[in-house]
Image (cartoon, rainbow, N blue to C red):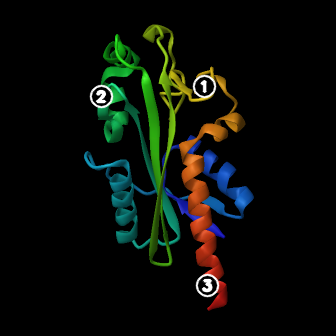
Amino acid sequence: MRLGFVTENAGKLAEARAVLSPLGIEVHHTPLPLSEPKEGTIREICLEKLHQVRRMGMDRVMVDDAGIFLAAYPGFPGVLTKRIFEMIGYKGFMNLLAGQSRQAWFEGAVAALWDGEIGCFVARTPGRIIEADPESLRPEPGFPFNPIFVPEGEDRVLSKISREERLKYSYRRKAMEQLAGWLKERMKRDRKN
């Protein structure tokens, strides 16, 4: 089973392949220009991206969207994570969290179009943001929060954990496993018809 993944993030593509290949789903890169909506939930943004892809005539394809949420600031930065990080960087996040709860979570959605049907799956990775000197931090390409986010049940930040170990905590893995189950149900149904 082949499934296109519309993303410009090589790390996300590698993670999708690592999760879905053992489940019998071959993920191939499908580069398409998508506009990023500026409001809504992670799920709503993901579905809007999928509708853009559908309007381009694509099928058997998936998209994703994700953000980090800070317990101290309900709903923030959420769908604006990338934009906010580009504006304020680590220094801004450290200032925002000074004296505040450092609890945070990643939330991500994966949506797929398969023979005209849409499936959308959402998952979370709870954890916390560490206190750190912003000048000492270097973003991991495509994953700027990995150097400051510690997943629940771990004592290391994501950037200090091997890529294989990260899958244990990955919200994207959780959502993609749900997606794989949904796709396999469609394949079973198609074989019966």
Residue 13 appears in the picture as rendered: no
* Residue 52 spot, x, y in % from top left: 35, 63
- Mark 1 or mark 2, which is nearer the start of the sequence? 2
Seen at 57% across and 68% down, the residue is 182
- Mark 3 or mark 2, which is nearer the start of the sequence? 2
SS assignment at label 2: strand
How packed is label 1: few (under 14 Cα within 10 Å), some, or many (20 or more)? some
Seen at 62% across and 20% down, the residue is 155
Q: Which residue is mark 3?
A: 190
Q: Which mark is residue 159?
A: 1
SS assignment at label 3: helix
Amino acid bearing label 1: Ser
Picture quarter containing residue 167? top right
Residue 97 appears in the picture as rendered: yes
Amino acid bearing label 2: Tyr
As drawn, is 92 to the left or to the right of 132? Answer: left
From this viewpoint, which residue is outermost toward the right?
22
SS assignment at label 1: helix
* Residue 27 spot, x, y in % from top left: 62, 59
Seen at 54% across and 27% down, the residue is 146
Q: CA distance from mark 3 to mark 1?
A: 41 Å
Q: Which residue is mark 2?
A: 73
Q: CA distance from mark 2 to mark 3?
A: 46 Å
Q: 150 above or below 66?
A: above
Amino acid bearing label 3: Asp
As drawn, is 60 to the left or to the right of 2? Answer: left
